[in-house]
């Protein structure tokens, strides 16, 4: 049994990591543990680079918290604003105890102007801004912004799963990496 340490206690993030590992390693036996790992970046990263840094830091901190783990997964959602449009996305970083690292990024999508303004002008995190706009509570631990904006066609678990799978490629094909 291999221990996968997820650098989050958010049930959506833990579930997406479970799904990705099950798909990539169908014969594998894994135990998953969520931990409160710090990102070392602002609560709402505002650039692609800062978001990736946060995911790396979370994976590193998870390894410090649970050094007996086999895999450490950092997930960080972020935004980047340009030309009056704000994109949302997330970076996923997976590291193993031997030091091998993989990374994947979700697709990006544009946030509505109302959410953009709450993030930029009022310093809200996207999840909080979505809760205000959609009159929800704690949506980031359920379907997230993508789920609210697509009417549930894509939820946060699905959005993140592809990026976790991408981050697992070096572990699927270790001889190539």
Image: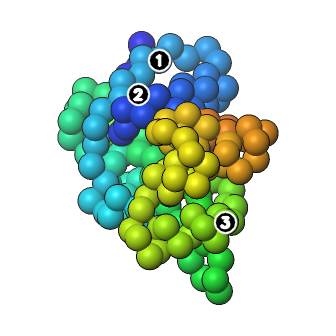
Image disc number at residue 4: 2
Does the residue at mark 1 contact the one at mark 2 (Cβ under 8 Å)? yes
As drawn, the residue found furthest toward the front would be 135
158 relative to 125, above or below? above
Position of 80 with respect to 122 (left or right) is: right
N-term-proximal mark, 2 vs 3: 2
Q: Residue at x 55, y 41 (%)?
A: 136
Q: Secondary structure at mark 2?
A: strand
N-term-proximal mark, 1 vs 3: 1
Q: Nearer the viewer, mark 1 or mark 3?
A: 3
Image disc number at residue 30: 1
How far, Cα to Cα, is label 2 from label 3? 35 Å
Image disc number at residue 112: 3
How far, Cα to Cα, is label 1 from label 2? 7 Å
Viewer-proximal residue among 157 and 69: 157
Position of 7 with respect to 127 (left or right) is: left
Q: Residue at x 69, y 61 (%)?
A: 109
Q: Residue at x 21, y 40 (%)?
A: 64
């Amino acid at each position: 049994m291999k221990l996968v340490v997820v650098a989050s206690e958010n049930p959506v993030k833990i579930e997406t990591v479970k799904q990705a590992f099950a798909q990539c390693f169908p014969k594998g036996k894994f135990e998953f543990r969520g931990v409160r790992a710090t990102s070392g970046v602002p609560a709402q990263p505002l650039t692609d680079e800062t978001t990736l840094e946060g995911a790396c830091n979370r994976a590193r901190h998870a390894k410090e918290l649970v050094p007996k783990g086999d895999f450490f997964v950092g997930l960080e959602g972020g935004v980047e604003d340009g030309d009056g449009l704000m994109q949302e996305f997330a970076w996923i970083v997976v590291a193993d105890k031997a030091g091998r690292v993989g990374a994947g990024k979700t697709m990006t999508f544009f946030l509505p102007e109302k959410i953009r303004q709450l993030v930029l002008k009022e310093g809200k995190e996207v999840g909080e801004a979505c809760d205000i706009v959609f009159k929800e509570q704690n949506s980031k631990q359920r379907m997230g912004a993508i789920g609210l904006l697509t009417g549930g066609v894509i939820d946060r678990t699905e959005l993140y799963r592809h990026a976790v799978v991408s981050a697992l490629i070096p572990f699927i094909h270790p001889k190539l990496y």
